[in-house]
Image: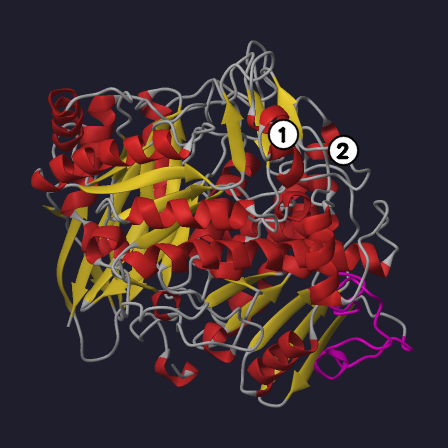
Amino acid sequence: MATSMLPGLWGRPPGAAWAASPAAGATAVPAGPPAPAAFPDWARFARIADGTFDDDAEPRDMKPVIDKLKAQNVSVIEVDTILSNWLSDAEFSTHMAQIKRFSDLAHTAGIRVIVYYPSLEVISVGGEKGKSFYKNSDGKNWVQRGLDGKPNVFYGSLVVWVDPGDESCWVSPNSPWRDHYLARIKALARTGVDAIWPDVPIYFDGALSWCDASTWAADAFRADTGLALPAKVDWNNAGFRRYVEWRHHNLNRFQLDIAAAGRSVNPDLVTFVETVTMDYKYATTVGLDGAHLRRAEGVSHVWEVDILGNYDGMRHATVSDWTCLISMYKYARAASGTKPAWAFSYGWKADDASLVMAETLAAGCNPYEVKSPFKTDSTDTAMRTRMYGFVAAHQEELFAAASGATVGVYHSSASRDFVSPVEGSGMYVNTKPPAGVKDWWSFDTPEESCTRQKWLGEFRGTVKSLVLAHIPFNTVPSPGVGADDLAGYRVLYLPNLQAVSDAEADVLRSYVAGGGTVVLTGPAPTGLDEHGGTRGEYALADVLGFRKADPVPATKRNTFGQGTCWFIKDLLGLAYLTRTDRPTADRLLEPVRTVAPPAVTLTGDPRIHLELSHLGDATIVQLVNFTAFGETPAAFTTKPTTCTVTLTVPAGRQVRAATVSTPDGSGGPAPKPVAWKTDGDTASVELTVAQYSLLNVTVN
């Protein structure tokens, strides 16, 4: 789509029209049966829940599980049974018959089935003292290994999903395990299930760091790069940095092979990979970068969006923590491309769970509602029933509407990996658990905070400034980025963008030359290549209007072609993330307010998250109220607040109808008429938002 199609609010927006055609740097899908043109509607409108049954269950035991979930407005059942465990071929075959029985019953009830199957972890029940996959089978040969050669295997309760006395063995995706697993994926596809859920294909770092250095991985790395595996962690070593980047591509190929294996049996089968890495640094340490799958058809993600406390949810979030959660969901939606983005919607109690789900929906993600830290239970079945009923009633508005954002925020995978590497994942801001709260995300380690990371902190602070200013935006992931990804954005933020490939730089350069505006922050703009190596010259020196030989200006506005580059040396996003001061936000947001002032505005508390989309003649505004959160953690409460939404009406058109819908309370999901006021070329609606409201304004 051309930028000229976006004169303002009522033009066709870019967000939901991300093209699926290959771009430079995109990973090709392996050859196989022709894939359907798009994901089926059942997957696009999915409302997901766990429906685990016992391995010895009879159909009479399975049917009540299905009926109960159907009554909760669930449309897709995730089946998580014994496939995590070390199973013989006979045991696996017997269990496939059970899966088929359950799937047939669910289909009779009108519900789809997706089966959870760990991709690289094998658990041996009782394996610490008894027989195990690692000690007594192929595990010792197929296991991932650290750079020091140690095997990635552990026992006991290191993580919540491995019971004391059990063994967890993480295998190399380059070992013969690959063929073993893909053969079982094909057997699973023959049962008639609708989708497969491979769990976290990662180089797990709970026991060891920087796997995989097995002989299988060493051979694959040398074949791909011509290099030997690095001997140790050394960010100054080009070979180590290449290893960091290679692991993303290696795991991506494995995921593509999984999807192709399933579709070789059933061309209608879709794959949703559970992806625990979001926009933060965990993708660097465990290798899984979900954005690499963005353009591959037939395979998408179930994003595991973690919360602050396993036994507290988001109940003690700060404002900055909440904007981090928004950032993760926005990244999930963007990194899934045109495909459905399923996402965990964790909660601890009904009220915090429904607010988290509101953010899931506002971002355009399909909710998988679950009580943390496990996934077999609902936080509250009445809440799930009410929220899923709302989703079912408004699925077109939530998942088929096109984004109205004309601002993009560029998420650079290479800059995440290579700009100022430090310890810590950066998942949230506040690392100190509130009094009485156990199992906090960071183990009270200040280095974990995203405020300690120069690239991530700048990215997250930019997101925070836009959220609190009620400016709609989309995340733009870097892997495989093409001109189509930027079409329609009037302003593109490039927070602390340092590591870029030549192909990326060409796309960004063409965007500016064609009339786009970029906002590039940080002291070394595009000074690194995609592998973290120092460039002799800035990749975008011509766009910036200065070179490495020149003093780095504090600020510079440079015209390039028909567009403009706003450069700011300071890390304003990081500063704003840390202290939330208005002058810093004003400096960072000046380009948007100058070039692309939002056509929908909100008067009210900054802590109301606004999302904008379009569906036919309807403009859809989603509002999520997190006004109860402050700069320090406090007891969770729901605090209804009133705001006014104002939108620009094009000449010759007028508002024909306005409705508001909400899952809050007991009034049901049906839209209710709401009054509007007109003043010249604007129309305004006043609303009181408890947790979540969906405003639909029809203009023609």
Q: CA distance from mark 2 to mark 1?
A: 33 Å
Q: Which mark is residue 504?
A: none
In the rendered image, which residue does mark 2 sit on? 150
Left or right: where 401 falls relative to 566:
left
Quarter occupied by residue 578: top right
From the viewer's perspective, is residue 107 above or below residue 377? Answer: below
What residue appears at the point 55 percent right and 52 percent down from the top-left corner? 463
The kind of residue tagged 2 is Lys
From the viewer's perspective, is residue 343 above or below residue 37? Answer: above
The reply to whether the magenta stretch includes residue 548 is yes
- Which of marks 1 and 2 precedes in the sequence? 2
**Which is nearer the eye, 538 or 418?**
418
- Name the quadrant of the C terminus: bottom left
SS for dot 2 = loop
**Which is nearer the eye, 100 or 683?**
100
- How far across and how far down the image is residue 165, in percent? 56, 12
From the viewer's perspective, is residue 556 above or below residue 608? Answer: below
The kind of residue tagged 1 is Asn
**Magenta span dominant secondary structure:** loop
Circle 2 packing at 10 Å, graded few (<14), some (14-19), many (20+), is: some
Question: Range of the magenta residues?
Answer: 521-550
In the rendered image, which residue does mark 1 sit on? 430
SS for dot 1 = loop
- How far across and how far down the image is residue 216, in percent? 68, 50
**In the rendered view, how is the structure colored?**
secondary structure
The reply to whether the magenta stretch includes residue 665 is no
What residue appears at the point 80 percent right and 62 percent down from the top-left corner? 227
Left or right: where 392 falls relative to 686:
left
Circle 1 packing at 10 Å, graded few (<14), some (14-19), many (20+), is: many
Quarter occupied by residue 96: top left
